[in-house]
Amino acid sequence: MNFTDRMIVLLRQNFRERDRMICAYTLEHGRVALRFPGVNRSDSKLKALSEPFAQSCARIYIRRNASVGCVTGGKIETVYPEIRKDFNKTQMAAYFCELFYRLTPDYNPNPDKFSLLENSLSQINCAPLNQATAPAFLLRLMQLSGFGLYGHSVLGIDEDFWQAMHELPLAELNFNSERDILNLNKTRYVCKRFLNRYLNYPLHTVCQLELTAPIPAQEQEKETEPELEPVLA
């Protein structure tokens, strides 16, 4: 099967002497494993397409019943240059990509998920990071993956804050008041509980969900978290 699809690289590793293996999230085919034959040669023209969080339109060939496809050509759309110039932004982009790798199934396309990753990378490429970027991204991915908490009252987090974390552009999530910082810490706590429960092993990327201050025990016990059903989509 030959097809052309837009994709964002989630991770890559060298394979044999000259090849690379990548995992990418594509617009029309979901998460796929792909091989770039000969891309580590000095004269390769496809090397940029195989870099982490590079976005491209690629020509892909997958044999019948094969689990790994092969990239035969393509055109770069963007490599998010401002992210690559900033160490913290690079860490955040790697965090986004690893979450997609760990929380999305193979060959199960979801255009909304692709748009979430594309828009989030574009926003951190153009704007500074803030404390709410990581938990807001995870909450939105949870919502699209069947673990959504939007519309539920969780740990007494203010409804306006909860709505903003799900809907506002990442660059606009600037919280400074004591109440907002408490809400943000509770949100990070919810995200960490979700990851601890549904991931078989910890993330390899740097944890972006550390609390800025401990949550008082009485605040944690105000309300019970709604049950999260494991329905990945």
Image (tube, rainbow, N blue to C red):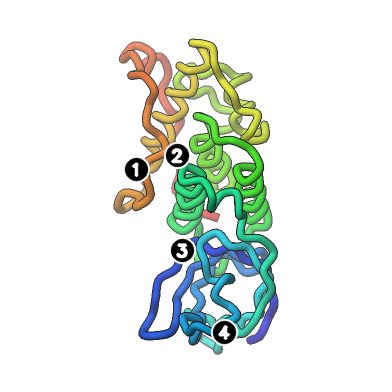
Q: Residue at x 47, y 53 (%)?
A: 103
Q: Residue at x 45, y 47 (%)?
A: 91
Q: Residues within 10 Å of mark 2 (few under 14, many from 20)?
A: some
Where disc 4 sits, the SS reads loop
Q: In the figure, 71 relative to 170: above or below?
A: below
2 and 1 marks in contact (CB < 8 Å) = yes
Q: Estimate the x, y position of residue 71 in percent, counting from the top left.
A: 58, 81
- In primary-sequence order, the first of circles 2 and 1 is 1
Q: Residues within 10 Å of mark 1 (few under 14, many from 20)?
A: few
Where disc 3 sits, the SS reads strand
Where disc 2 sits, the SS reads loop
The three-letter code of the residue at mark 4 reads Ile
The three-letter code of the residue at mark 1 reads Arg
- In primary-sequence order, the first of circles 4 and 1 is 4
3 and 4 marks in contact (CB < 8 Å) = no
Query: Mark 1, mark 3: which one is toward the viewer?
Result: 3
**Disc assigned to residue 208:** none
For label 4, the residue is 62
Query: Mark 2, mark 1: which one is toward the viewer?
Result: 1
Q: In the figure, 27 relative to 221: above or below?
A: below
**Quarter of the image where the C terminus is located:** bottom right
The three-letter code of the residue at mark 3 reads Leu
Q: Estimate the x, y position of residue 157 in percent, counting from the top left.
A: 51, 19
> Distance between the Cα atoms at labels 2 and 1?
10 Å
Q: Estimate the x, y position of residue 155 in percent, counting from the top left.
A: 45, 20
> Distance between the Cα atoms at labels 4 and 1?
34 Å
Where disc 1 sits, the SS reads helix
